[in-house]
Image: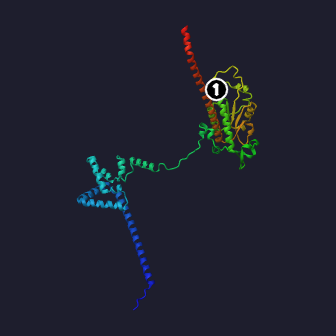
């Protein structure tokens, strides 16, 4: 007889139902396992809470009773159980050998035995319970810090442990964070100015030297130094500023090197500019006018200086800036500066006119509202900004200080050369003088 035909649809249905049943069984097993783990965690939390609330004396009694029970059992079985537990801890809990070695039943015995042996029975039960309740310390820390005394879990960290935690934090995270560099410090422009060789367009741009005045106050002679217009304000070409600044620094350095008198004129009301003005004059051994320019200070010097009664205000100095005695007619003579540096030329037009009539060269910070043709060495720059004025004044005074140092070095070399020549002359004339004295 022929074999019955197999219903493929029925077979596929049975396989599908079997797969669904297996999937449901696996899902139920996973849910049951998660439930058991959750119950175990809750039970562990309850046990830990109960253990934390249990007095230390009762815990001590239980541990002693457990040790007595373990002592009654065969030690081979206890050792075998200990090895099995260690294997389980290392394999399933994924702990290192150092942490797995800190098992409570072995650690408590060692701590208790060491405590009893060290104190020779003088420790109280409370001290023993604290020692047994102390958390296990890694052998790495014990070997590195032999005097470390670990504290129990229910107590706070000791000073030693806090110090070690701080060291660990510094090793791991102490170098993290950001450090701000190239911070602008205003006092540097006054007391430690940069040299003209270090000045760049970026430095001038950061100081705001490019900002001019409104287009309505523009002067035609400032056209070569103009860069453009932005929002109704003229912008200064900083490339021209750098070029003119270097030229002015060469001039002021040469005047200072030749022993010329440099006069700084700045009548700003800002205290920072006043401080920079005083520091610049002291740095270059020059003079300054900070309050008000008295008309006729240069062109009518004799009449203006009649009001000065302080003898220190009328002194004559040599090339080393040392006060020396002067002739009788010195105080009646006209003294003119060799170079005048103006910080705000718009407010000191009388000074500019007197310098022109007396043929005195001038260096000035010219803004877009100033006639640059009236200045011998104009420096196109913002003369209203405190930072830009301090920067320019510091650079100019630094150049003057360089010329002053060159002059003092040259004088020192001349003195040493004269001294050597005199010593050589004495050595040459010495034997002949001795011979003449012997013949007499």
Specify the quadrant that holds the N terminus.
bottom left
| Picture layout, residue 159 above or below residue 2 | above
Q: Nearer the viewer, residue 333 or 346?
A: 333
Q: In which quarter of the image is residue 75?
A: bottom left
Residue 160 sits above or below residue 301 on the image: below
Position of the C terminus by quadrant = top right
**Visible residue check, residue 381:** no
Place of residue 365 in the rendered image (x, y in percent of width and height, measured from the top left): 69, 39
- Quarter assignment of residue 38: bottom left
Residue toward you, 214 or 410: 410
Left or right? Give the position of 356 relative to 176. Answer: right
- The residue carrying mark 1 is 319
Q: Residues within 10 Å of mark 1 (few under 14, many from 20)?
A: some
Residue 118 horizontal side relative to residue 394, left or right: left
- Residue 216 lies in quadrant: top right
The percent coordinates of residue 209 (x first, y second) are 67, 43
Q: Let me know if residue 143 appears in the view.
A: yes
Number of numbered discs visible in the structure rendering = 1
């Amino acid at each position: 007889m022929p074999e019955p035909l197999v219903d493929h649809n029925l077979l596929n249905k049975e396989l599908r139902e079997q797969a669904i049943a297996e999937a449901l069984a696996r899902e139920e097993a996973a849910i049951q396992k998660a439930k058991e783990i959750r119950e175990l965690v809750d039970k562990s939390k309850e046990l830990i809470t109960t253990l934390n609330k249990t007095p230390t004396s009762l815990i001590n009694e239980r541990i002693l009773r457990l040790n007595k029970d373990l002592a009654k059992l065969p030690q081979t079985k206890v050792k075998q159980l200990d090895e099995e537990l260690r294997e389980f801890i290392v394999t399933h809990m994924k702990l290192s050998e150092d942490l797995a070695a800190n098992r409570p039943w072995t650690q408590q015995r060692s701590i208790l035995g060491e405590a009893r042996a060290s104190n020779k029975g003088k420790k109280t039960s409370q001290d023993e319970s604290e020692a047994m309740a102390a958390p296990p310390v890694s052998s790495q820390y014990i070997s590195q810090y032999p005097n470390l005394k670990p504290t129990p879990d229910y107590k706070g960290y000791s000073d030693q442990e806090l110090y070690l935690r701080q060291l660990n934090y510094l090793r791991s995270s102490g170098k993290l964070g950001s450090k701000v560099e190239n911070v602008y410090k205003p006092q540097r422009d006054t007391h430690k100015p940069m040299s003209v060789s270090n000045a760049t367009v970026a430095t001038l741009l950061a100081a705001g030297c490019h900002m001019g005045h409104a287009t309505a106050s523009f002067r035609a002679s400032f056209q070569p130094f103009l860069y453009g217009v932005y929002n109704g304000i003229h912008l200064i070409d900083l490339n021209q500023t750098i070029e003119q600044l270097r030229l002015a620094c060469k001039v002021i350095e040469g005047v200072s090197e030749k022993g010329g008198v440099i006069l700084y004129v700045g009548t700003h009301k800002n205290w920072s500019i006043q401080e920079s003005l005083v520091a610049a004059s002291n740095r270059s051994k020059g003079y300054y006018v900070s309050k008000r320019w008295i008309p006729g200070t240069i062109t009518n010097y004799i009449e203006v200086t009649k009001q000065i009664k302080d003898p220190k205000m009328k002194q004559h100095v040599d090339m080393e800036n040392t006060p020396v005695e002067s002739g009788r007619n010195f105080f009646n003579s006209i003294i003119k500066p060799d170079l005048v540096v103006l910080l705000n030329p718009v407010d000191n037009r009388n000074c500019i006119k007197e310098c022109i009539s007396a043929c005195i060269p001038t260096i000035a910070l010219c803004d877009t509202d100033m006639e640059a043709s009236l200045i011998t060495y104009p420096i196109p720059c913002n003369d209203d900004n405190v930072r830009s004025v301090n920067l320019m004044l510091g650079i100019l005074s630094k150049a003057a200080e360089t010329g002053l140092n060159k002059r003092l070095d040259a004088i020192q070399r001349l003195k040493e050369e004269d001294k050597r020549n005199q010593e050589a002359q004495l050595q040459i004339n010495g034997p002949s003088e001795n011979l003449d004295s012997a013949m007499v």
